[in-house]
Image (cartoon, coloured by chain):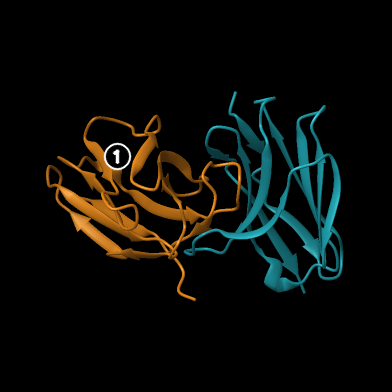
Chain colours: A orange, B cyan
Amino acid sequence: GAGVSQSPRYKVAKRGQDVALRCDPISGHVSLFWYQQALGQGPEFLTYFQNEAQLDKSGLPSDRFFAERPEGSVSTLKIQRTQQEDSAVYLCASSWGGTPSSYEQYFGPGTRLTVT
Amino acid sequence: QKEVEQNSGPLSVPEGAIASLNCTYSDRGSQSFFWYRQYSGKSPELIMFIYSNGDKEDGRFTAQLNKASQYVSLLIRDSQPSDSATYLCAVTSNDMRFGAGTRLTVKP
């Protein structure tokens, strides 16, 4: 079946612009996760949804970052007033389980964001 | 101190050898442990997961977990050049935390 998909794959934004990154999880997966991965680093947790409920947003680096999953399937990560330090790959993952520890996560291809 | 620590490498082994990748974690409440492989420019893909102390084998891969020592490892037997990648250790309690990854190079 289809895996996790993300769009766009690449995004170049001028500093100060708003961006929206989309994630389509595997059908039926309850949990959805967003990560930020800087070059040469492991993914850093941003936020987590169980169905439409955002249960943990402790990893969001500032109030410029906002995520939603209104119908419990597709999710959007929005970054307002982008800064150069926001440049990274944004990974989305989904999982069958209702908690982060219950099942393995499957990752999408990521969106590479470059802020100029 | 980072929550999940891995040697960044690079770790270089000859083809056919055993590659040993190590990971330590700080949260004693961690419940699940995962190894992901990430090729350059690609997203992480799951190799193995382990929940209980001891060894878990899957083909050429063996994951080892010691909760008392807060240590998890991955052994790759009969290493192949196609195993050359960055290996990420991930640990979950309330959320999933990744190490920075160990870069493995298998030389023909």
Q: Identify the residue at horizontal 12%, vertical 47% (top origin).
A: A17
Q: Quadrant of residue A46?
A: top left
- Residue at the image point whose x is 49% and y is 76% from the top: A1
Q: Residue at x 21, y 35 (%)?
A: A64
SS under mark 1 = helix
Residue in the picture at 53% in, 41% down: A99
**Residue A19 higher or lower than A2, as above or below:** above
In front: A69, or A93?
Answer: A69
Pointer 1 indicates a residue of which chain?
Answer: A
Camera-side residue: A80 or A58? A58
**Coordinates of residue B25 in the picture (x, y in percent):** 68, 31
Q: Amino acid at mark 1?
A: Glu
Front residue of A39 and A57: A57
Where is residue A32 drawn, in percent x and y?
42, 50
Q: Position of residue A51 (x, y in %)?
A: 39, 48
Q: Is residue B13 above or below residue A3?
A: above
Q: How many marks?
A: 1
Where, by quadrant of the figure, is residue B2 drawn? top right
User: Is disc 1 surrounded by few (<14), some (14 to 19) or many (20+) residues within 10 Å?
Assistant: few
Q: Looking at the picture, how far across and down is residue A102, in whole percent?
A: 61, 45
Above/below status of A38 relative to B58: above
Q: Is residue B61 left or right of residue A108?
A: right
Instruction: Tell me which corner region of the image, top left, top right, bottom left or bottom right, holds residue A60.
Output: top left
Identify the residue under disc 1.
Answer: A85
